[in-house]
Image (tube, rainbow, N blue to C red):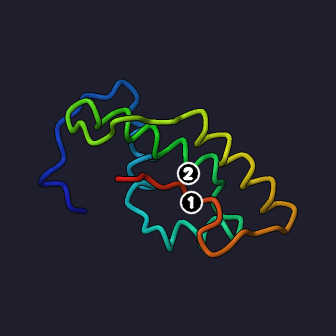
Amino acid sequence: MYTSCEPKVSNPNPAAADASDELGFLSAVEAARRIRQGELSPVDYTRALLDRIARHDPNLNAFIRITEDAALDAARKSEQRRDAGQVDGPMHGVPFALK
């Protein structure tokens, strides 16, 4: 695991950090595969990434605006569509950041 550039951030909930860190290192292709196959919830994945952003962004200042509610709403809709057999392309359910 590559960590030399990771800032040291204290986290009151190490178990949550472990889960979001693990998911945070998935490639978008691997996340999409797991979501498509039902191994990963788009909502859980989005929450894990948002948790990771919340922990690290105060030191990194990488984001200007985080649309947490919109991201979670889109994740819920993606999960419902996937569960109904309606997959909207190869990256269905994978959140993204625009730079």
* Mark 2 vs mark 1, CA separation in Å: 8 Å
User: Which residue appears at 18% of the width and 47% of the height?
Assistant: 6
* Contact check, label 2 and label 1, Cβ < 8 Å: yes
User: Which residue appears at 40% of the width and 29% of the height?
Assistant: 13
User: Which residue appears at 42% of the width and 52% of the height?
Assistant: 97
Residue at the left extreme, as displayed? 4
**Which mark is on residue 45?**
2
- Three-letter residue code for mark 1: Val
| Nearer to us in this view, 24 or 1 | 24
Q: Quadrant of residue 52?
A: top left
Give x and y (percent) for residue 95.
53, 54
Residue to which mark 1 is pinned: 94
User: Which residue appears at 60% of the width and 33% of the height?
Assistant: 69
- Three-letter residue code for mark 2: Tyr
Give x and y (percent) for residue 21.
38, 49
| Nearer to us in this view, 13 or 50 | 50
Q: Can you say whether 13 is above or below 2 in the image?
A: above
Label 2 Cα neighbours within 10 Å, binned few <14 / some 14-19 / many ≥20: many
Is residue 43 shown left or right of residue 3?
right
Give x and y (percent) for residue 57.
29, 36
Q: Quadrant of residue 38?
A: bottom right
Is residue 64 shown left or right of residue 71?
left
**Which mark is on residue 58?**
none
Label 1 Cα neighbours within 10 Å, binned few <14 / some 14-19 / many ≥20: many
Is residue 75 shown left or right of residue 66?
right
